[in-house]
Amino acid sequence: MSGSAAEDGHPVCRKCLIADLPRGAELRKILEERLEQIPPEEKVSDEEYRARLRECRRCGQLHEGTCAACGCYVELRAARKAKHCPLTKTS
């Protein structure tokens, strides 16, 4: 894979979330299912979720919806109260 295109010829989107990727509908569906499975008491508010994803989009470690620092799908990590960015001191 080169720096600008995946092996299938589609461009690599280094600052995209899974929901934004031009390909990968199957992965988006799995992500949505996983988000729905998180119990409400374990989820952050919609406002907090959006704020967390904004921070991920600004980070140089975001690569096609995955955090290069820890390997997680950021949309799943951002949704859970108990999960935080591995690069911040937030507990």
Image (cartoon, rainbow, N blue to C red):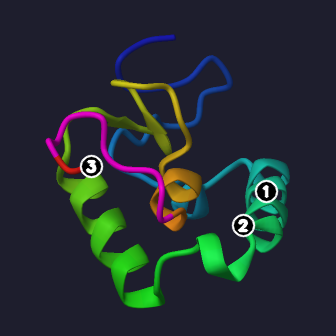
Whether residue 60 is situated above or below residue 69 in the rendered picture:
below
The answer to whether the residues at label 1 and label 3 have Cβ atoms under 8 Å apart is no
Camera-side residue of 17 and 41: 41
Dot 1 surroundings within 10 Å: few (below 14), some, or many (20 or more)? few
Q: Report the residue marked by disc 3.
A: 91
* Residue 59 image point, x, y percent: 20, 44
Q: Report the residue marked by disc 1.
A: 25
User: How far apart are the alpha carbons under marks 3 and 2?
Assistant: 22 Å
Q: Marks 1 and 3: which is nearer the front?
A: 3
Q: Amino acid at mark 2?
A: Leu
Q: Secondary structure at mark 2?
A: helix
Whether residue 78 is situated above or below residue 49 in the rendered picture:
above
Camera-side residue of 74 and 8: 74
Dot 3 surroundings within 10 Å: few (below 14), some, or many (20 or more)? few
Q: Residue at x 59, y 63 (%)?
A: 19
Q: Residue at x 30, y 35 (%)?
A: 86
Q: Residue at x 79, y 73 (%)?
A: 36
Q: Main secondary structure of the magenta part?
A: loop
Q: Residue at x 14, y 42 (%)?
A: 89
74 relative to 8 in the view: left or right: left
Range drawn in magenta: 81-89
Q: Earlier in the sequence, mark 1 or mark 3?
A: 1
Q: Amino acid at mark 3?
A: Ser
